[in-house]
Amino acid sequence: MAGNVRRFYELTAKLLSGEAFSFAALKGKVVLVENENCKNEEILNCLKYIRPGNGFEPKFQLLEKVDVNGKDAHPLFDYLKSSLPFPSDDTMALMSDPKFIIWSPVCRNDVSWNFEKFLVGPDGEPYKRYSRNFLTIDIEADIKELLRRVK
């Protein structure tokens, strides 16, 4: 469960630099949270030299790697999973092979694999959850819809 957290903007996490980051800094913005599979030191190098490459420097916050499921799940993912219990594009998404379940306890709303995504509206309300198979580029229409709400 998300504990006492009632709003996205009450959450905090650590940036790759180790600095604390408050999601309150994102008030009024559309936010995409994506669980990826790299370790902290790999994330920037992958972006800079592999995809998209050519020295790419992100202009968005990159957070330290955290647990997304089980008893050690980060409060951000507890909150998002309780707000959006399954991906909108695959309501039956579960881990396909039980040997990959390495956390406990296992819950129906767990993130089933890397690259699951959560879209949060400018009001801080979780808007939609997407499975790992849903291409990030295809979220554009939902992002545009949420951006229309920003004034």
Image (cartoon, rainbow, N blue to C red):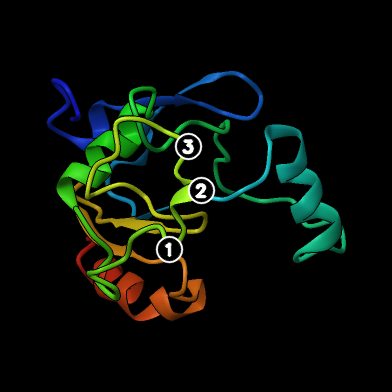
Residue 88 image position (x, y, % from top left): 24, 70
State yes or no: discs 2 and 1 in contact (Cβ < 8 Å): yes
State yes or no: discs 2 and 3 in contact (Cβ < 8 Å): yes
Q: Is residue 82 left or right of residue 36?
A: left
Quarter occupied by residue 117: bottom left
Residue hosting label 2: 100
Residue hosting label 1: 96
Kindly state the secondary structure of the residue where label 1 is placed. Answer: loop
Real-space CA distance between mark 2 and mark 3, rounded to the nearest whole angstrom: 6 Å
21 is higher (above) or lower (below) than 114: above
The residue lying toward the viewer, choosing from 60 and 76, is 76
Quarter occupied by residue 12: top left
Q: Amino acid at mark 3?
A: Ile
Residue 79 image position (x, y, % from top left): 23, 37
Residue 131 image position (x, y, % from top left): 38, 66
Q: Amino acid at mark 1?
A: Ser
